[in-house]
Amino acid sequence: MRDVKENLAFIQGQIAEACERSGRKPEDIHIVGVTKYVSVERAAEALEAGIRNLGENRDDGLISKWEVLKDKPLWHFIGTLQSRKVRNIIDKVEFIHSLDRLSLAKEIHKRASKRVKCFIQVNVSGEESKHGLQPENTVEFIQQLEPFENIEVVGLMTMAPYTDDEEALRTCFRRLRNLKEEVEGMKLRHAPCHELSMGMSNDFQIAIEEGATFIRIGSALVGE
Ligand SMILES: *Cc1c(COP(=O)(O)O)cnc(C)c1O
């Protein structure tokens, strides 16, 4: 397996290129290192290489790494979150990328001891296998979150379709950005919605060109 450091240098080069093409600044792009497939030692290597944000998609995976690394990284929960698992992870995470239903919002609000930064997951591609709100229901859903004071809607998140069709990916990311701008324009106190969590190992350059501020990189950074 290659050094995380080498992988990170390569990814940073690709980020710089994508920023160059789209008139953006690399410092505005946050890399979330996704460690779900790898050991805690490998996750620690990512921290040594300079990664600050780590993402896990299961409660047990997050907890076992948290027990060793504690709050050295900022933890992101990026996967489907069952309501009954919320209390296991809530005081360990800084960000949740997968808020997509009111029952989950209620549970987060109830269990959190401080405000949690949440991304609303949107199923832009419409693929049935994917979680998330339909785009047309997203604004109303966000309005309904106002009473939950422990939730701050920092942005929107999507998983692109699994394809190498560049135009399809671009369309997906662009739709999420448009939706984000719509919510942002509403200037809701509980939902500033400035961020876009989109782009993974095989499509992050396109996501950056279309406005991503958080990219979630697993295999290209730490391996599978
Ligand atoms: C696994 C995962 C990633 C990272 O995927 P890679 O293709 O390995 O970069 C990103 N986001 C979510 C929600 C994931 O589950």
Image (cartoon, rainbow, N blue to C red):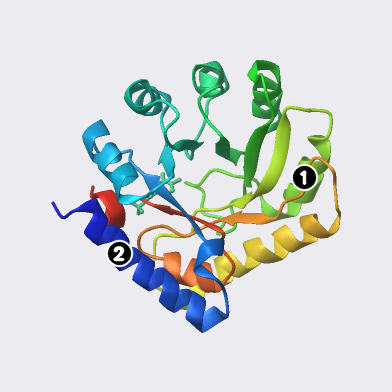
Q: Which sits in the foreground, 137 or 205?
A: 205
Rendering coords of residue 45 (x, y %): 25, 43
Label 1 to label 2: alpha-carbon separation = 34 Å
Quadrant in the picture for residue 201: bottom left
Instruction: Name above or below for residue 22 compared with residue 104.
Output: below
- Cβ at disc 1 under 8 Å from ligand 1: no
* Label number found at residue 9: 2
Tell me the element at label 1. loop
Q: Residues within 10 Å of mark 1 (few under 14, many from 20)?
A: many
Query: Mark 2 and mark 1 in contact (Cβ < 8 Å)?
Result: no
Amino acid at circle 2: Ala
The residue at 73%/49% (across/down) is 138
Horizontal relation, residue 139 to residue 154: left or right: right
Rendering coords of residue 151 (x, y %): 71, 32
Tell me the element at label 2. helix
Instruction: Name above or below for residue 4 compared with residue 202.
Output: above
Q: Which sits in the foreground, 211 or 16?
A: 16
Residue 90 seen in the figure: yes
Depth-wise, is mark 1 or mark 2 nearer the camera? 2
Rendering coords of residue 3 (x, y %): 18, 53
Horizontal relation, residue 181 to residue 4: left or right: right
The residue at 78%/28% (across/down) is 148
Q: Which sits in the foreground, 146 or 137?
A: 146
* Label number found at residue 191: 1
The residue at 55%/21% (across/down) is 91
Amino acid at circle 1: Ala
Q: Earlier in the sequence, mark 1 or mark 2?
A: 2
Instruction: Name above or below for residue 177 compared with residue 66.
Output: below
